[in-house]
Image (spheres, rainbow, N blue to C red):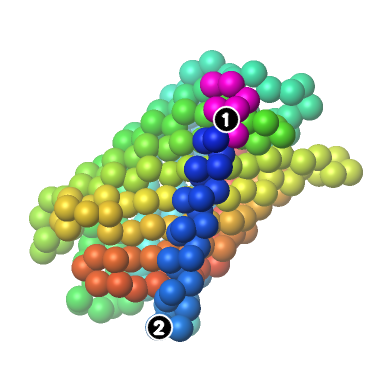
Amino acid sequence: MGKAGTMRALGRVVLVGLLVIVESHRGWAQETREQFWPELDAYVRLSPATRLFFLAAPVREADQFQESQVGAHIEFGLAPIRRRPDRGLYDQDRLQFLRLRAGIRRTFSLSGDERELSETRVVVEATPRAFLPWHILMAIRNRLDFRWIEDQGYSWRYRPRLWLEREFGVAGIALVPYGSLEAFWDSRYDAWSRSRYQFGMAVPITTWFVPEAYYSRQIDTSPERSYTNALGIVTTFYF
């Protein structure tokens, strides 16, 4: 893709982002759920191209933890993409041209509410990456969730996500601000049922310890319209 084509593609991305933001702000005057999304992640290296990924991610709302998700995955990566020599102060795997991930997750209630549903989910992802002008790293994640929800049976979701980030080195410290747009196609409704945009920053303290904070705005349209604001804190360890 030439420079003109890249700029056109970026223009489309910005337009989509603006449309999502405008749509989300229609809901500010309506009731919006406020949540806290803490998350603990761990990567365990098996070989130069393969690693394991584990996560634990509860959801807190109204001063109570409502649910939690735990998961285990395996990742594979292809050759690194070309990059500047001074880039990549942490997690070199995220600079690979293509990463594949497969795993299983379990969601369960922490509130004791019998109406809350438990879920077993098989996750498959393919994420190509490329550098754009101004050293912006773009990742387009394609994710499929195969879901078995208690009392609802089997369904699936397709979750494409556009991710843009740029790494800065400031006084020997890496700062990695990012933004993402994600859409959800849900087979239960045969429709795009959710959209989510997110802005945050990762701050690699060392090559093995990376804290991250972000803000997320989520818009659900099926089975009914609702809005969620979330503050996320992610702590990641690399072994």
Local SS, label 1: helix
Kindly tell me whether residue 207 is visible in this rendering.
no
Q: Main secondary structure of the magenta part?
A: helix
Residue located farthest toward the top when viewing the structure as drawn: 79
Q: Are circles 2 and 1 on residues that touch, CB within 8 Å?
A: no
Residue drawn where x is 52% and y is 57% of the image: 18
Residue located farthest toward the right when viewing the structure as drawn: 171
Residue 111 falls in image quadrant: bottom left
Local SS, label 2: loop
Where is mark 2, residue-wise? Answer: 31
Kindly tell me whether residue 230 is visible in this rendering.
yes
Q: Amino acid at mark 2?
A: Glu
Where is mark 1, residue-wise? Answer: 6
Q: Relative to the observer, which residue lies in front, 111 or 221?
A: 221
**Could you tell me how many numbered marks the image carries?**
2
Q: Is residue 29 above or below residue 218?
A: below
Q: Relative to the observer, which residue lies in front, 94 or 239?
A: 94
**Horizontal and vertical percent for residue 98?**
47, 24
Q: Relative to the observer, which residue lies in front, 16 or 119?
A: 16
Q: Is residue 172 above or below residue 45?
A: below
**Horizontal and vertical percent for residue 146?**
22, 44
Residue drawn where x is 68% and y is 40% of the image: 166
**Horizontal and vertical percent for residue 81?**
59, 20
Q: Is residue 128 above or below residue 116?
A: above
**Horizontal and vertical percent for residue 203?**
71, 49
Question: In this picture, which residue range is highlighted in magenta?
Answer: 1-7
